[in-house]
Image (spheres, rainbow, N blue to C red):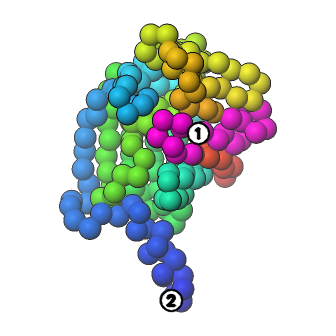
Amino acid sequence: MNKKYLLSCAFLLLPFLFSAGCSTTNNSLELQHRLTKDISSALPSVACSTDFLKHSLLKFKWGEEKGTLMVVEKCSNGILTLDGLMPTGLELFQIIYNGQEVQYQEKVPMVHSLPIMEILFDSIAVRIPPKVLESSLPNNWTVKENKNEMVIFDSDKNPIETFNWPKGKRGDIVMISNHSFSYEIEIQDLPIN
């Protein structure tokens, strides 16, 4: 292998690898995700409504930090499983959510750039009906939807998170802008061979 390729791979791994710790950790996480720095909410009780298997490329930007993950997302019998992998195929983590419990397994010790529960919330939010999503939010929070966009508003009508489908809801790309934590995620579905 050439030196440039190895340096590129090492650079890609830096944001995710942690210098010390075990190779695998298992955690049962609370069913709360943060909507703002001060407000948390329960995850929607519906993890997913229909069975599916999707491979996606997840690109994120948070401040100066940028990264790319491959995500294998599977729904089977109402249980949502997210496997996060490096673009090289190295498995980083697995999240399993059944609507009542979240199990998180870290395959490689990582510095968590984006909180796991927010990634899980975003993955659920793009797949469930807006009214179901809205029912999981605090009182007087709303979800507004049009053809290509869905926005979560707080009780003061401030936008908290925007989901945009540039090619319409049936398209293979969704762009997520979280206004509370100033991160952006682009999820692009990949073909499954």
> Disc 1 to disc 2, how far (Cα)?
36 Å
Frontmost of labels 1 and 2 is: 1
Q: Residue furthest front?
A: 156
Q: Which residue is drawn at 41% across and 52% down?
A: 113
Disc ID at residue 3: 2
Q: Does the segment drawn in magenta span residue 178?
A: yes
Tell me where residue 164 sits by quadrant: top right
- Give the class, few, some or many, for how many residues have Cα within 10 Å of label 1's Cα (few <14, many ≥20): many
Disc ID at residue 25: none
Is 35 in front, or is 11?
35
Q: Is mark 2 on a helix, strand or loop?
A: helix
Q: Confirm or deny contact between disc 1 and disc 2 (CB under 8 A).
A: no
Q: Percent x, y for residue 16?
A: 39, 61
Q: Which residue lies furthest to the left in this view?
A: 21
16 lies left or right of 64: left
Q: Percent x, y for residue 173?
A: 69, 42
Looking at the picture, which amino acid does disc 1 mark?
Ser
Q: Is mark 1 on a helix, strand or loop?
A: strand
Q: Which residue is drawn at 51% across and 66% down?
A: 88
Q: Percent x, y for residue 132?
A: 54, 14
147 lies left or right of 115: right
Disc ID at residue 177: 1
Q: Is residue 77 visible to us here?
A: no
Looking at the picture, which amino acid does disc 2 mark?
Lys
Tell me where residue 99 sits by quadrant: top left
Range of magenta residues: 164-184
Is 39 in front, or is 146?
39
Q: Is residue 45 visible to us here?
A: yes
* Sequence-first tag of 1 and 2: 2
Above or below, 20 against 150 in this view is below
Above or below, 9 against 147 in this view is below
Q: Residue at x 57, y 45 (%)?
A: 185
